[in-house]
Image (tube, helix red, strand yellow):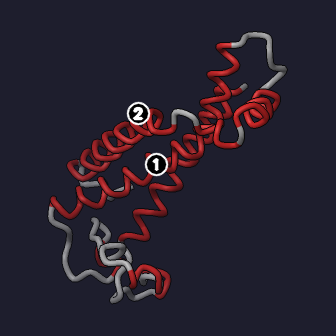
Amino acid sequence: SLTITRAVVLGATKMTVYNEIKDSLKRSQDAPEISKRPSSLQLAVPGSYGWKDSDYAKYGHASGPSTFERLGLVFSTSVVTGLAVTTTTSAFTNARTHMMSNPGKYTGMLACMADVVRTLGPLGLYRGFMAQWARFGPYATVQFIVWEQLRFMCGLPGI
């Protein structure tokens, strides 16, 4: 069903993007492994690498993060994750809304999405994007800050 598809896309996007962005921001020029060093693009963008987390030694950082640095990393990563979740689920959210407001009109999710593209254009799948992001952005931010803080308080490594 459409709700299950949307939930799978949401969950997979949320964890994958969060982990990848967080790992990317933690990269350091002093990292022992080449894979933990910033890319040439990251080197050109100030602030896109060198963030610290509980696994600071793995990334070549000399010291652990302050509370401000740790929470800053989680906050930044969460905002990007909320944006990615919104981008990947918006089309499904809009299709679900069209199907619920027009019962019996569509034979399924793909037929609904095709009709939206046909009548409103491809951007019709992303109508209401800012409202959806206003929901997912704070949701992802609060969720990850709470998870990370609880893990930290329990002595567990970050996600």
Question: Residue 24, how many percent across, how many down?
Answer: 43, 70
Q: Nearer the viewer, residue 38 or 125?
A: 125
Answer above or below: position of 92 versus 19.
above
Q: Which mark is residue 18?
A: none
Q: Nearer the viewer, residue 2 or 148?
A: 2
Q: Quadrant of the C terminus?
A: bottom left
Question: Residue 37, how many percent across, how many down?
Answer: 42, 84
Identify the residue shown where x is 20% and y is 71%: 64
Q: Quadrant of the N terminus?
A: top right
Identify the residue shown where x is 56% and y is 40%: 10
Identify the residue shown where x is 30% and y is 78%: 57
- Of helix, strand and loop, which one carries label 2? helix
Q: Is residue 9 left or right of residue 115?
A: left
Looking at numbered disc 2 in the image, what kind of residue is underneath it? Arg
Tell me where residue 38 sits by quadrant.
Answer: bottom left
Is the residue marked by circle 1 packed among few (<14), some (14-19), or many (20+) residues within 10 Å? many
Answer above or below: position of 144 versus 2.
below
Q: Is residue 62 left or right of residue 19?
A: left
- Of helix, strand and loop, which one carries label 1? helix
Q: Earlier in the sequence, mark 1 or mark 2?
A: 1
Identify the residue shown where x is 20% and y is 68%: 65
Answer above or below: position of 88 versus 55.
above
Looking at numbered disc 1 in the image, what kind of residue is underneath it? Leu
Q: In 3D space, how far apart are the residues under numbered discs 1 and 2 (Cα atoms)? A: 10 Å
Tell me where residue 27 sits by quadrant.
Answer: bottom left
- Whether pointer 1 and pointer 2 mark residues with C-beta atoms closer than 8 Å, the reply is no
Residue at image mark 2:
135
Question: Residue 63, how many percent across, how many down?
Answer: 19, 77
Is the residue marked by circle 2 packed among few (<14), some (14-19), or many (20+) residues within 10 Å? few
Q: Which mark is residue 83?
A: 1
Question: Residue 52, how many percent across, how many down?
Answer: 27, 70
